[in-house]
Amino acid sequence: MTGRRSAFGEDLFGSDAVDAVDGASTDQSPVVGDLVGGGAGTVAARRFDGRPVDLEGVTEDFAASLQDRSGDEPLNVDVPLVIGDGDGAGVLEPQRVHSVDDVDARQSRTVGDLRSGDGAGGEHDQGNGTEANHHRESIWTTIPPWSKWLTGALGLLAVVALAFATFQPVQVLPRIRLAPGFSFVDQAGAGFTSDDARGDVVLYGFAYGECGADCEPHLQTMAEVASRVEAETDLGDVDLRLVTVSFDPARDATRLPELAAAAGADGERWRWVTETDEESLRTVLSSGFELFYTEIDGGSYRFDPRFVLVDGWGVIRGEYRYSTLAGDADKIIRHIGILGEELRNSKGAASIAYEAAHLFLCYP
Amino acid sequence: MTTSPIVVTTRRRWERLAYVAVGLLGVAVALVAFRPHTFSGAVIQSPSPAPALEGLTFHDGRPAELWRFDGDVTLLFFGYTHCPDICPTTLAAVARAKEHMGSDGERVHVVMVTVDPARDTADDLESYVTHFDPSFLGATGTAQALRSAATVYGIHVEVGEGTVDSGYTVDHTASLIAIDTDGFVRVVYPTDVAPDALASDLEELLG
């Protein structure tokens, strides 16, 4: 075991001026964690792993490279110093001590960074320590350590929020607007109102009996969704209804059963409906579902073919214009699945994650 | 040369743990402080402003222009003065929610749009809605204008059998619709929303 005499003389620090040298991280120095100047006679050292380290001295070369924060160099060190291992097993060479950073200004008014190296300046050049840098570092080093941790924690939170918005671990469908209130009559002559649909997920589509090829995509998509949705989605206790609304009540009101049968609508999951009051129907479809349709020559209609997905609250969650999109059935079924997951899982604490997903627009 | 004793030690382990604890506490506080408010109704993120009540007037004769309430919150309800149950229950709950809010309640405007224009005159509406709170407003208009307003707000209306003399009921969707300070429909409440929960939501909407 080598001697325990301190070799950091007053010329370098002054024991009163140096109370502590904090913040040396292990990647900055494999040896020194904190240097703490204490009362007379107390000389002790520990590694980060708890083993002791004695500070005996520093070699002359090392001492010559020490600088103070203002860039004055070298500090006047009279006595060559060597850093020794506490158990005497070996001498810790100054080259291994690359730096001791973050001296708290309250703890030392004298020393900023201590850097060892190969001569003046070493690998960490301190020679450009301007007054501005000095001032900035002083401000930084006066920030309490706990606030740095808090800043780090908030930064981590921001990263998590960004990752949530980017990677979308929870997806939701947008809550677009209220679906309209209506009172239709279905293929069986029974009433079907917007209140009847509450609590169920409903996919609305729009067609008319004499539509022909223009409505083929609608009929095919409805049939495909009806046949696949059971196997590919899980809505829990919520039912899915498919509703085709005829906007040609004058001709279709009396032949809804025929139209429904031809389309394969069973009247349970998939039904055809209309309203005989054309003015009310137009208000529902145009103002409520935002469907464009207008009668043209020969009893035909020009219309904007679309589907509208509505949740059990009567809120529109998806709108699909199949004239511009391919694979509507796949997309609609996938969206019904997402809606089902939200309905099943958005309860209790998990509802916060779903609200966050709406907040961060985690839409498919 | 004068020598001074120097102690070299690692940062004490408990001190680091304390910093970690402070950091975790900060995260927890941030999570609580910034967590999304959970509304008691269905939240809507409509990209379009709330539909106008075209052709309707308040019971005092002013046009029912909801945009005049921008900066405040508006609660819209569709009902009628002969309503036996759900309308008075809902309006009473809204009145209690406003009371819970104290002075902030003055920034909540409550409008009941009639679904029974055949019987609900402006005077009837005034005496009915102000019975619950003097600030409440009734709105009426032509049957067509009222039907359009109900439709776009998702309200289904069905007039029952009977006449004005014999009496009848009107089945209607009894949702309570909150329009935020920017004039967008934000929340749709079920009929049984609790007054304190509603008050909390309204405070959130007021910001």
Image (spheres, rainbow, N blue to C red):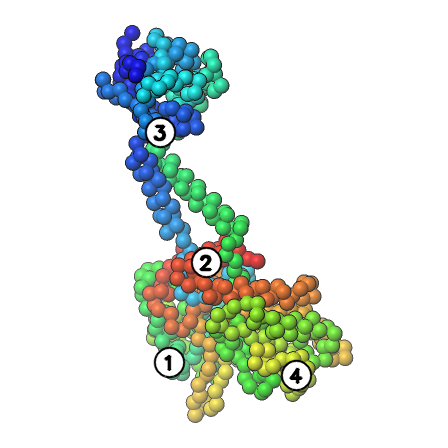
Q: Is residue A135 above or below residue A10?
A: below
Q: Which chain carries label 1?
A: B
Residue B103: quarter of image: bottom left
The part of the image, by quadrant, that contains residue A205 is: bottom right
- Of marks 4 and 1, the one in the foreground: 4
Q: Is mark 1 on a helix, strand or loop?
A: loop
**Labelled pair 4, 2 in contact (Cβ < 8 Å):** no
Where does residue B42 sit, x and y in percent of width and height?
A: 45, 66
For mark 4, name the chain: A
Gap between marks 3 and 4 measured at Cα: 80 Å
- Residue linked to disc 2: A355
Structural crowding at the residue carrying mark 4, measured as other residues with C-alpha within 10 Å and reported as few (<14), some (14–19) or many (≥20): some
Q: Which residue is the site of mark 1? A: B85
* CA–CA distance in space, label 4 to label 1: 41 Å
Q: In this view, does A132 lie to the left or right of A17?
A: right
Please, what is the three-letter code of the amino acid marked with disc 4?
Ala
Amino acid type shown at disc 3: Phe
Front position among marks 4 and 2: 4
- Quadrant location of the C terminus of chain A in the rendered image: bottom right
Residue A137's x, y, as percent? 41, 26
Tag shown at residue A261: 4
Task: For the residues labelled 2 and 1, say whether their Cβ atoms are less than 8 Å apart.
Answer: no
Q: Where residue B201 sits: x, y (%)?
A: 39, 62
User: Alpha carbon of mark 1 to alpha carbon of mark 3: how far?
Assistant: 74 Å
> Which badge, 4 or 2, comes first in the chain's sequence?
4
State the SS at label 3. loop
Residue topped by disc 3: A48
Residue at coordinates 44% horizontally, 23% vertically from top-left? A133
Residue at 37% across / 28% down in the picture? A23
The residue positioned 35% from the left and 30% from the top of the image is A49
Q: Are marks 4 and 1 in contact (CB under 8 Å)?
A: no
Callout 4: SS: helix
